[in-house]
Amino acid sequence: MLKYSILVLVSLLGVACQDRMAHRILSEEDIKNLPQASAIAAPAKIDPITKRIVLDNGQPNTDTIAIAFDGQYHWLTEDYQIQTSLSAQVPVPHRYRRIAVEKGSYAEWLRFLPMLPKGTTVKLHDGSVKSYQAGAYQVVNIDIGKRDLQQCADAVMRLRAEYLYSKKQYSDIHFNYTSGHTINYSDWVVGKRPRVKGNKVYFSNKNEAAKADYSYFVFREYLQSIYLYAGTSSLNQEMNVRRLENMQVGDVFIKGGFPGHAMIVLDMAQSMDNDEKVFLLGQSYMPAQSIHIVNNFHDLELSPWYAISQIQEELITPEWTFESNQLKTFQKK
């Protein structure tokens, strides 16, 4: 059985702004003076001698900030490296800069997801290579599992749950089965379990004497249950509609159904010349496969970014077409 280790030490490494011409390696004093919102406008590199982050984007008047998330991505079996992050691997289009996001937010966490090297193939849960590779831009460095479970909506729920777990926001981790029953992680850790019989769901009693088990192993057990009995239909009903012009990182394009599909907004950037905003889309698919950023075949110069202004009645992606009103966001308490 695959064993997971919990990384409990979280260290944040920041990099401050650089001016128009400079190529700088930031000092500890620079790091202390970082703004509270993070935005990075170009790929980050690591100086091989000092091991510090180097930024050299060549774009004038832009803030360039990178934050390392060592210990935030619990599935990693190796140390987190900032140069592998989405923000370092996927440059923004010319004269765009990444939108500022709140420090510690889900948007920031998604922006710094670890990526596998460009050219890595999308694989299925059984280890075989997906037959259709053209739609994928780059693969996220996150495990798939060995069963055909972590499909499209499951990948969206996985990312959301992993973020909340990393922040120890355990009471906010909950999803609905297709039956409509809410499955709370806070119940799961004290032994309360759903029992499925046909179309009915029963719950065992909590073990009041048991100490809550927040280990990563039990967390992954909880997710396996969600993958089995939840999907696009249930997730679609849990989320709130978001207007395109109000899109935020972490929002989801979703069509609930059998089959349906769900894709997550992994990052956003804005033009330095006007109000134009662009976004990245990530997905898993059927059968369960690597989570990956998708290409944009309808604007090859902009790809893998998509422009909000180009979405009229439909959003056309390599393997699915959404209606423009199918953008949703997670409910907030």
Image (spheres, helix red, strand yellow):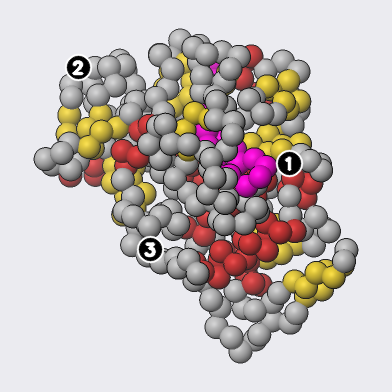
When the figure is inspected, residue 196 is found, relative to residue 43, above or below; the finding is below
Of marks 3 and 1, the one in the foreground? 3
Question: Is residue 266 highlighted in magenta?
Answer: no
Q: Earlier in the sequence, mark 3 or mark 1?
A: 3
Task: Identify residue type, mark 1.
Answer: Asn
Label drawn at residue 297: none
Q: Which of 313 and 142 is in front in this view?
A: 142
When the figure is inspected, residue 189 is found, relative to residue 38, above or below; the finding is below
Q: Position of residue 140 (x, y in %)?
A: 47, 41
Q: Residue at x 15, y 39 (%)?
A: 48
- Furthest residue toward right: 199
Task: Identify residue type, mark 2.
Answer: Met
- Furthest residue toward bottom: 209
Determine which quarter of the picture holds residue 171: bottom right
Q: Distance between the residues labelled 3 and 1?
A: 33 Å
Q: Residue at x 48, y 66 (%)?
A: 2
Q: Position of residue 207 (x, y in %)?
A: 66, 85
Q: How far apart are marks 3 and 2 (CA)?
A: 38 Å
Residue linked to disc 3 = 7
Residue linked to disc 1 = 240
Determine which quarter of the picture holds residue 241: top right
Q: Which of marks 2 and 1 is nearer the N terminus?
A: 2
Question: Is residue 285 highlighted in magenta?
Answer: yes
Q: Which of 319 and 47 is in front in this view?
A: 319
Residue linked to disc 2 = 21
Task: Identify residue type, mark 3.
Answer: Leu
Query: In this picture, which residue range is highlighted in magenta?
Result: 276-293
On the rendered structure, is 97 left or right of 245? left
Q: Which residue is drawn at 62% across and 47% down?
A: 288
Q: Which of 163 and 258 is in front in this view?
A: 258
Q: Is mark 2 on a helix, strand or loop?
A: loop
When the figure is inspected, residue 292 is found, relative to residue 311, above or below; the finding is below
